[in-house]
Image (spheres, grey):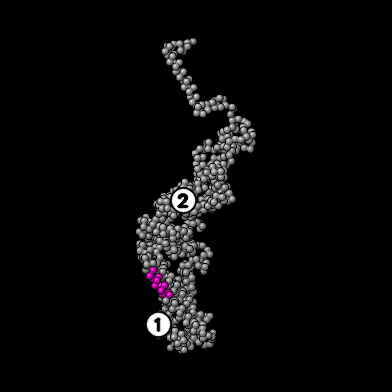
Amino acid sequence: MIHPLRDLSPHSRRSLTCLFLRVVSLKIFTVFLLCLVGIPIFSPSALGAPQEIRNEDCLTCHDKIAPEKYAHSIHGKNLCTSCHADIREIPHPDKLAPVQCANCHTLEAQIYRASDHGMAVGAGISAAGCLDCHGEAHSLLNYRDPQSPVYRLNIPKTCARCHEDQKKMAKFSLSESAPLKSYSESIHGKALMEKGLINAAMCTDCHGSHDLHAPTNPKSKIYWLNVPSTCGKCHENVLQTYKRSIHGKGAMEGKRESPVCTDCHGEHGIKSHLDPTSTVYATVISEKTCGRCHRSEKLNAKFNLPTDRVSSYFESYHGLASKLGVTTVANCASCHGAHDVLPSSDPDSSVNKAHLSRTCGKCHPGAGKKLAMGSVHGTPSPKENHIVYYVMLLYIGLIIAVIGGMLAHNSLDFFKKFIKHYRELKDKSRYLRFTVAERIQHFILSTTFIILAYTGFALKFPDAWWNFPFMIVKSNTDWRGVIHKGAAIVFILLGLYHAWFAVFTRRGRQQIKELLPRWRDFKDVFTQQIYNLGFSKERPKFAPYSYIEKAEYWALLWGSVVMIITGAVLTFENFFMRYLPKWALDLATTIHFYEALLAVLAILVWHFYFVIFDPEAYPLNPTMLTGKVPEEEKAIEEPPKKDPPKEKKPE
């Protein structure tokens, strides 16, 4: 056998010997250096470790751990010593080091330690740790497993184990005392817990999981500035629209007053906009949501916004009908938009004057461009809707003058008659004043007048106690409006019949002739006041129709014409919007309301006095019921030139 080194030259053999010595020296130096820095060189495996500890060996003693559950768990393929790393032999010491999930889940542990839960645990405060959420240590399941506590459908109940415990949570002063209850009633909760829609938003989607923080922490996903992006993970299109809006721009500039998603929709209790209990439901969004900020004097002053926008809306037909529960009328979002709100000065705004006819046209087809000539929200004032303002002042002055004069007149008349203690009417001989047809007209007139007044003021004052019949049942049908319009049709038909009666019948022409104003009527007003004040002892005598009845009749005709015209404009607003400016529609609304107020007050103060509260008539003048005038009343009238025909009995 030939030795491999014999054939080498002495020089080559010396070279190989030197190389061998260098390699050995390097290894010795390396071992020495590693020992110096404390790195173990001879691990159990290097020295021949003891026999590997199998899971079966552990379960021999730890019989409370179910082998099948552990095998099915996410750690089922791991050895017990993977987590209990300080076990070197069996039996092992009684006291072992706590298992550290962070040994494997390093990133999650770092995030958790910086969270509210992690910092609380680090400070020695009882808070949720890994196993509180993920489940029992030896049966942990993958989060995709439906049996896992952190499976999406199970997370709300997992969080609720702590957060529904009001006694445990009391010391933390959390804003939600029963978060699971409120969440389960929300649109997200119902989708997840009732319908099983796994993609519906739940706790960790909004609050985070390992990185959970309080809403006051800028790092929190539910910190007000981060809320839009948190919601935007699911509602991406809405987020992009919101960012372009005046609210979104304000929020991104750090203005806390700018509303974010939760300010309008709520938090755990978010409801569908079709749910009547939602804060963005059609009939409550203007009052509870938009109105909460836009009626604030502080916010309006800070951002230089008009202070009357909410109040002027609720004074309009839209606002009044909305208070009655009508869901089809326009609310704030109908005109301004919801997530895309922009100031009216912005060319892209839906309430910009260039787009106003299109916006109104969504509900009022054919709305004309002249609508932009009026202020939409403007209340009557010298600066906004000034024509409406001055007409309103005119009516207020007219009401004060007319009703004040009526009250003064009737007060004098009442006290004069009351002092003289007139006895009750004696029904002896009677003089025919009204036929059956005329009494029927009066009955229809009085009935429709009362219905029109009641249903009209019910719209103007929806919160009044006497408005309860229209508030009992919520409906998309405006029954108040239906009744009001029905009574108006009857009122108009009665007016047409009366016009025919007054022109084409002999009786009607005679009545109109007697009701025509004469110079004597103005004289009678003066002589009656002289008598009431006691300056004259002789009671004046009147024609069959005195200035009292004549004033009522012609005021009724004038008021009826005004109410019919303005009512027609308001009823057929889609037609008139094509040709009239906005201020003209506002003017019609103002006249319609104040004329109605004037008419009702005149009836109460003037007409009711002479037919009810007049001592000579109390408790009721029976003339309109019987058609005849008592003998005493006939005695103070000048006899007519010719008696009217006798009343015919109806067939």
Q: Is residue 514 above or below residue 109?
A: below
Residue 245 relative to residue 101: left or right: left
Q: Is residue 182 above or below residue 627?
A: above
Circle 1: element type: loop
| Residue 70, disc | none
Q: Position of residue 87 (x, y in %)?
A: 59, 32
Residue at which label 2 appears: 224
Q: Is the magenta stretch mostly helix, strand or loop?
A: helix
Q: In this view, does 176 lie above or below 484?
A: above
Residue 608 relative to residue 576: left or right: right
Would residue 171 be visible to someone looking at this image? yes
Q: Which of 1 and 263 is in front in this view?
A: 263
In the picture as drawn, the residue positioned furthest to the bottom comes out as 538
Amino acid found under the numbered disc labelled 1: Pro
Q: Position of residue 387 (x, y in %)?
A: 37, 68
Q: Position of residue 629 (x, y in %)?
A: 49, 84
Q: In percent of the image, x 53 and y 51: which residue is there? A: 174
Residue at which label 1 appears: 517
Q: Distance between the residues labelled 2 and 1?
A: 72 Å
Amino acid found under the numbered disc labelled 2: Trp
Q: In percent of the image, x 41 and y 69: which residue is there? A: 590
The residue carrying pointer 2 sits among few (fewer than 14), some (14 to 19) or many (20 or more) residues within 10 Å by Cα, namely: many
Q: How many labels does the image show?
A: 2
Q: Nearer the viewer, residue 370 or 576?
A: 370
Q: What range of the chain is rendered magenta?
A: 389-400
The residue carrying pointer 1 sits among few (fewer than 14), some (14 to 19) or many (20 or more) residues within 10 Å by Cα, namely: some
Circle 2: element type: loop
Residue 92 relative to residue 427: left or right: right
In the picture as drawn, the residue positioned furthest to the front comes out as 36
Q: Which of 338 and 526 is in front in this view?
A: 526
Q: Earlier in the sequence, mark 2 or mark 1?
A: 2
